[in-house]
Image: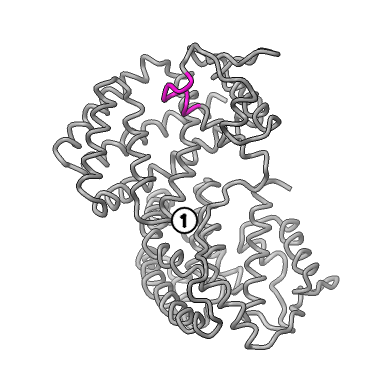
Amino acid sequence: MADSEKMIYNLVYDYYETRILMGASRYGEYLPSIPRIGESFQMAPRTVRAALARLEENRYIQIEPRKPARVIYQTADAHIRENAAFYFVPRQAGILDFCLSGKLLIEPIWEYVQTKLDLETWSRLKQKIAMAGNISLSVSTRLHIYAFAALQNRLIMNFYWEMLRYLRFPYLSVHDTHKSRDSKFLMDEKTDETGFMRQAFEGDFDKGVDYLMAFCSQAEKEYDLKGRAEIPFRWNVYWQRPQICYTLASRIILDIIKGIYPIGGCLPSLAVMSNQLNVSFRTLRRTLSILDSLGVIRLHRGKVSEICTEVREIDFNRPEIREGFRYYRESLQFMTITMRPVFLYVIENVRKEDCDYLVNEFMRMFNQNKYRRCFQLAFEFICEFCPLAAVKECYDNLAYFLIWGYPFSIYYNGRDRLTEDYICKTGEAAQYLMEGKWEEFADSWKALAENELRDAAQYVCRH
């Protein structure tokens, strides 16, 4: 089973477990057929079966040959309320955070998708949703799923699913309330998708949050949960332990860029690096092997690794290299779509001293001819100072994947050409920062990222 399938396997399991434990799917009810679930969740039938098998193993449902799965979990209403209280009360702050974070991370992606899909594609997506019928996922949620899937960016889909897994309450909505509105939207090809989604978010979602916060306020007292430790949102990008090597490789590349490990020098010994990075020898060896295939270092048996002065031949036949490059491209697209509203939000919500710090550090890096580090600094500024936890969590993860672009850019463009591109854009951006023109700076940064994204698309064509 592929990693993407394992991701959706957990999503479907969580979806139905939530509905059963919290009383939205009751004893004796039948789940939709495997084909209908697969169509609505955009997944293979075997992955649906795996999720249902786990639900049956945990005694939530019963599976019989040639019949839909049936809910066999029984519990009293009081227990259902308790299940909801213990899940949602510790996540109140995180859910409220998402109300704002979603406007910066999800809405820009939705607007971007609308510019990429033609009327025929939108019509086809609506028809697919209508044909799938009601599986207790709202039309707006399913439209997000279908539209985001059309981007073919697994990182964006992963983030959206992880957001739903954390929020959970959209799984519990009673969608018959807007049946006539949803039906009209699906049947009318001229309906404004943006208006519909805005109504769904500002109406349905906001009302759901208001109801949930009122419930949590009562449940805190009822179950003595006041002061219980909060459970923040965590973006679980990786679904298998070995994938951590991608982040570890990024950390080492970033240390090379910063000069902590000087180009032309050598990395510390395995023992020293293992202790510094808090990883096992096995994980570190695999990471160094990946960096060797990236052409960043040269491994020497029985000796310390040499940091290459130029990125040599990259082994694009190695699966880890292709996967790392995918992470880079998809994170770059994610950032390019969201960076402008995110950056401007951060600037509007930090102290003047923090803005001054960004300007001074940016100019310091610019004067030292560290042009690529200038924009890395701007990214780190968002990760450090953004007041929204979900945005910080998202950008912290994107930061690691973006580092993978460094060896690819050096390999294809060479250091001289890459430097020329950055000198021009960085000088322009530096001027905007000095003048306090935040929107112009954001536009300049976005333009540079879009150029890098186009270059990445060309790299794909070559391999």
Point out residue 447 in the picture as x, y percentages from the top left corner: 31, 36
Please determine whether, in this image, residue 176 is positioned above or below residue 396: below
Point out residue 207 in the picture as x, y percentages from the top left corner: 41, 78
Image color mode? one colour
Name, please, the residue furthest toward the right.
65
Answer whether residue 286 is magenta in the image. no
Residues drawn in magenta: 253-261
Please determine whether, in this image, residue 60 is positioned above or below residue 125: below
| Quadrant of res 260 | top left
Point out residue 354 in the picture as x, y percentages from the top left corner: 25, 45
Q: Which residue is mark 1?
A: 120
Disc 1 crowd rating (10 Å Cα; few below 14, some 14-19, many 20+) is few
Residue at 43% x, 21% y is 259
Residue at 47% x, 27% y is 255
Q: How many marks do you count on the picture?
A: 1
Secondary element under disc 1, as helix, strand or loop, is helix
Please determine whether, in this image, residue 168 is positioned above or below residue 215: above
* Nearest the eye: 460 or 237: 237
* Nearest the eye: 309 or 13: 309
Point out residue 214 in the picture as x, y percentages from the top left corner: 43, 82
* Nearest the eye: 278 or 348: 278
Name, please, the residue furthest toward the left.
435
Q: Is residue 77 left or right of residue 417?
A: right
Which amino acid is tagged 1? Glu
